[in-house]
Image (cartoon, helix red, strand yellow):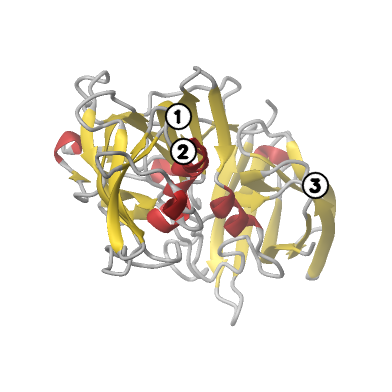
Amino acid sequence: MRSLISIIGFVLVALWAVGCSESDTSAGIEIGNPEIASRNVGFTANFSIDYTETKKASLAKSASEDENVVIDTFRLMLTEVRSTCSYYIADQKPREDNSYLGPDVGDPAAVLPISFTDGDVVKEPFKNISLRTSGFLKEIKVAFQIIRQGGYNSIYGRVRVGDKKVPFVYELSHFQLFSLMYRNSQIDIQDSLVNLSVVFHVHRFVDGIDFASAKVGEDGVIRISENSNENVWNTLNERFIPSFLSLWYEYTNDEAMTIKNYTPDVLNELNNVFNENIVTNGNFKDGGKDWIFFTQEGGAADTAIIEDGKSNLMKVHVSEGGTESYSVQLLHEDISVAKGAKYKFVFTIWSDIETEITARLGSYITYEKIGFEEHVPVTKTGRSFEVEFTAIVTDPFARLDLNLGKKKATFWIKDVQIIRIK
């Protein structure tokens, strides 16, 4: 791989270093380089069910008296929590670090009982984890096993039929185990704590299903399984894992087949954003937040944020150009694009010399181009560069590269935008 290596790490949270105006003593700090991070953070996770009509609600909602479906008991066995991170080293061989986090760091084979209906908050099994902020969080994965005993293989609740609430049991026998992957933007990251909320959304699970026509057993219970009310069971099987609203998921079914897919609700919310900049902090108003600065192959440079009214500037002073255009890189990860969708990339750049840079949108893991790759001429006066492109694949973690190497130069960059136009 001819560019920097993006690697899976053990770390859970991104730390950025923010450059300031040129007169500030911190000007020139290398933006986003993980090796300058020094803090440790803790980790917790909470598990709950939610009755809000919309997933945008800031607080989970408990069941109200007029809910048509109420879940009374929902328990699973948590088997593992893992983090996926990227960090940057000048190395030609990718490395993969163990990113296992729990539930018991002393015994990776351990399982942890979780009750969603009790609103479990997991602290004790993770209390000894100290997570160094030396990388950039991509995802957190949680995995569950369906245990065929002790109430861990079914969801118990009540459904309104006429003027009565009839108990039901939905059997999870279609699943052996499953994993949920949550994107970094779905995770609460604070100064000293990372918290993952695993929420089961009831309305996403049951809305529109005709429980009134379901067969009620002699014991007065609606049993939903492969042997009873099979049509309802099949529909709930399709909805069960997507109702957690993770970015994507993977599960093994009762026939030992493995299925992997994105959750359409979450992916559509990321990708169906039109006429808005999907490059976070593209105007550098938050300093170097969300940006990564990297040098390799003989490159040497430093950076500064210059206040310039409504839109700040990123200044990159390349003191040694190195042997390749990617010897000096300004990068932005986690740009979500949809296969076949049309986008516009636009930014403004100038330099103290007439030169050329490379701008591209690619995979942060493989470096393959998934959007565009353009050689951009740079003049001594500010020039806006624009290119339209169609995404080759769907990727929630695409990476924008501005390769500034090969020549000694000083660059000024502003108003970096990627906008979906079709």
Check disc 3 and report its element: helix, strand or loop: strand
Residue at the (69%, 43%) spot, across then down: 394
Q: Check disc 2 and report the residue beneath it.
A: 233
Question: From the image, which quarter does the C terminus lie in?
Answer: bottom right
State the residue lying farthest toward the bottom. 309
Q: Earlier in the sequence, mark 1 or mark 3?
A: 1
Give how far apart the Cα atoms at labels 3 and 2 are: 45 Å
Q: Is residue 14 left or right of residue 345?
A: left
Residue at the (42%, 64%) spot, across then down: 25
- The x and y percentages for residue 137 are 44, 43
Q: Check disc 3 and report the residue beneath it.
A: 372
Which disc is residue 123 wearing?
A: none
Q: Earlier in the sequence, mark 2 or mark 1?
A: 1
The reply to whether residue 300 is visible in this rendering is yes
Q: Earlier in the sequence, mark 3 or mark 2?
A: 2
Q: Foreground: 162 or 272?
A: 162
At label 3, which amino acid type do we have?
Answer: Phe
Give how far apart the Cα atoms at labels 2 and 1 are: 7 Å
Residues at discs 3 and 2 in contact (Cβ within 8 Å): no
Q: Is disc 2 surrounded by few (<14), some (14 to 19) or many (20+) residues within 10 Å?
A: many
Q: Check disc 1 and report the residue beneath it.
A: 226
Q: Please tell me whether residue 220 is drawn above or below residue 382 in the rendered image.
A: above
Q: Foreground: 260 or 271?
A: 260
